[in-house]
Amino acid sequence: MKLRGLNRGLSHKYDNPLHYYLTLDEQKHPINELIGESISITFENKIQCIHCGRIIKKTFNNGSCYPCFKSLPENDLCIVKPNLCHYHQGTCRDNEFAESHCMTPHYVYLAVSSDVKVGLTRATNTLKRWGDQGAVQAVPIAKLPTRKDAGDLELLLTKHYPDKTNWRKMLKGEITDMKLEDARQQAVTNIPEEYSPYVLREEQLIEFQYPMQQSASKLTSYNLDKQAQIEDKLVGIKGQYFIFASGIMNMKKFAGYHIELDTKK
């Protein structure tokens, strides 16, 4: 099997284990069946902005050209720091984007990828968000009216929980012994009274399994900027990572790269 096109990263369909797809150009290719196979990924020396199609020499924020990085709302600082939302200040990059993505209900959640972490996501985007982070368990603990509201609560809870995934531990399968249900109960007691109308106390814990023969044994990162062709046995997929026998590759990092994926299968 040989696949070619503009890499747009990994997506997945929820099941246990998750069903993964590699998007090249606009087509999604199922790839769980490649686990256990020796594959090659070749960079074809062409990079395009995934938004405007401009030919570029390097990407910004996982697939953007510099003009799109500076102008598009999905690349604004408030996307990674929602408490800094500036929609009501009249300086939003795109009001239509804000109304459909930010001025809508958001969950604040706890997830276990390695340690227990706090995060937020649109109420319609939970399974995608948790799968992209490599979570093995997750649960919403509050539902807020807007992204800004959720960002404010998330910031308060970072006093007790990290808001970043430890990708090294996640790929190695090093999981905390702390029970997520215990963490949920503890987190609820740390939520200020003003947020009590939004607290969720009985949401179901969601579990995730990944298509894996083994966890990452080596955290050597394959880099298409330094090595135009990678050949290795694919032993797992987790989050946005291909896990190989001798290294790992963050497919989202190389969004915008034209690649060829080849396997003998």
Image (cartoon, rainbow, N blue to C red):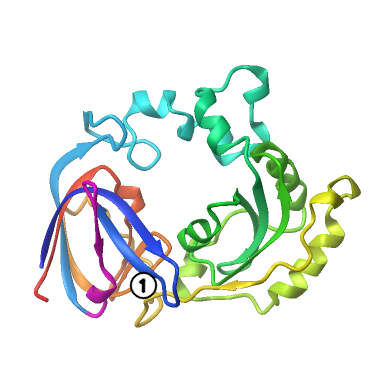
Dot 1, how many residues are within 10 Å of its Cα: few (below 14), some (14-19), or many (20+)? some
Q: Is residue 253 above or below residue 31?
A: above
Q: Is residue 65 above or below residue 199?
A: above
Residue 219 left/right relative to 121: left
Task: Give the extent of the magenta segment.
Answer: 24-36
Q: Residue at x 51, y 69 (%)?
A: 169
Q: Nearer the viewer, residue 124 or 23?
A: 124
Q: Which residue is mark 1?
A: 218
Measured as percent of width and height from the top left, residue 247 is found at: 31, 68
Measured as percent of width and height from the top left, residue 261 is found at: 15, 60
In terms of image quadrants, where is residue 174?
bottom right
Residue 121 left/right relative to 3: right
Give the farthest residue toward the bottom: 213
Asked which secondary structure carries label 1, the reply is: loop
The quadrant of the image that shows the C terminus is bottom left
Q: Nearer the viewer, residue 35 or 147?
A: 147
In terms of image quadrants, where is residue 12?
bottom left
Asked if residue 25 is among those painted magenta in the image, a careful observer would answer: yes
Q: Residue at x 58, y 34 (%)?
A: 78
Measured as percent of width and height from the top left, residue 150 is found at: 70, 44
Q: Residue at x 40, y 65 (%)?
A: 13
Asked if residue 199 is among those painted magenta in the image, a careful observer would answer: no
